[in-house]
Amino acid sequence: MTEQTGELTTVCHVRAPLLLEPIDEQIETLQACEGEGAIDDLLLRSWPKEVALSEESPHQEVLENYERFGRWADDRGVSIRPPFRERATTSQVTGETRERLVTPLLCLEIYEDDELIGVFPHTNERTEETYTTDEAIATLRTGAVPTPLEPTDAESASEADGAPDATVSDPCPDCGGDLIDGQGLFACGDCGWVGRVTDAGRYVAEAASESTAERRTPPQS
């Protein structure tokens, strides 16, 4: 959890027919958070159990929310599937198959000022850990801001953030230029050499045989 620094807005999406326990208790807690000043604004939105995944769907706002939540999850290295789920249904009359989106019972999107900082629930697919809406609401009740789960793959998260490949200390075996570590595949930005490192610590050109292209790793300074 983190401390609140800006204006906090929480949008709560819920299936309208399911305003029953324990869903109504979660909403009541959110309303208490707004009344106590733990959040600045609470917006309640209802959505159907499932919507058609098509441009003709009358529920385009739900699909836009789904796409926005998906982009947030991709940037964070986590997943919103589940709680969202896509499924195919086939009409017994026409035989036509349609893709549909199944929505969660309750979903929160949290903004600090105008920035989307959290969608709950979401899941770390590697650890199978889920940050539930109950946990997010409990954190909000304390006056803190829920911190999303750590990324599923730190390497993928770095790539998504635009982090450059690391430069290694060894020079290029062909020209002596700087080598770039592309996660196991090394490349020279000066001469274009590309290769790998063997278990013996030798650079081997990717496109050539080991007998002709293997070179000993230059000593590190």
Image (cartoon, rainbow, N blue to C red):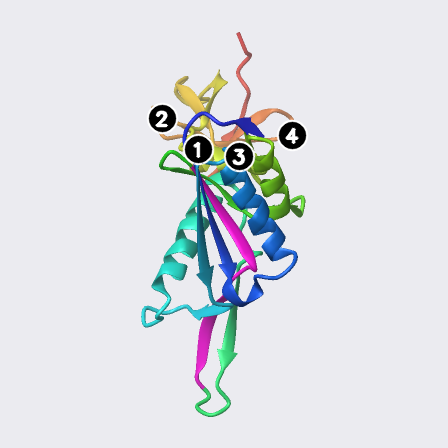
Q: Is residue 158 magenta?
A: no
Magenta region, main secondary structure = strand
Where residue 108 sits: x, y (%)?
51, 48
**Vertical order, 112 against 202 (above or below):** below
138 left or right, relative to 185: right
Q: Are marks 3 and 4 in contact (CB under 8 Å)?
A: no
Circle 3 is placed at which residue position? 36
Mark toward the viewer: 2 or 4: 2
- Residue displayed at 50% across by 82% down: 90
Mark 1–mark 2 distance (CA, rounded to whole Å): 9 Å
Is disc 3 surrounded by few (<14), some (14 to 19) or many (20+) residues within 10 Å?
Answer: few
Mark 3–mark 4 distance (CA, rounded to whole Å): 61 Å
- Residue displayed at 44% across by 69% down: 51
Q: Give the range drawn in magenta.
A: 96-111
Determine whether the residue tagged by mark 1 lies in a helix, strand or loop. strand
Earlier-in-chain disc, 3 versus 4: 3
Earlier-in-chain disc, 2 versus 4: 2
Q: In which quarter of the image is the N terminus?
A: top right
Kindly identify which numbered label has been placed on residue 199: 4
Mark 4–mark 1 distance (CA, rounded to whole Å): 17 Å
Mark 3–mark 1 distance (CA, rounded to whole Å): 60 Å
Is disc 1 surrounded by few (<14), some (14 to 19) or many (20+) residues within 10 Å?
Answer: some
Which residue is nearer to you in this view: 112 or 168? Answer: 112
Determine whether the residue tagged by mark 3 lies in a helix, strand or loop. helix
- Residue displayed at 42% across by 47% down: 71
Circle 1 is placed at which residue position? 194
Circle 2 is placed at which residue position? 189
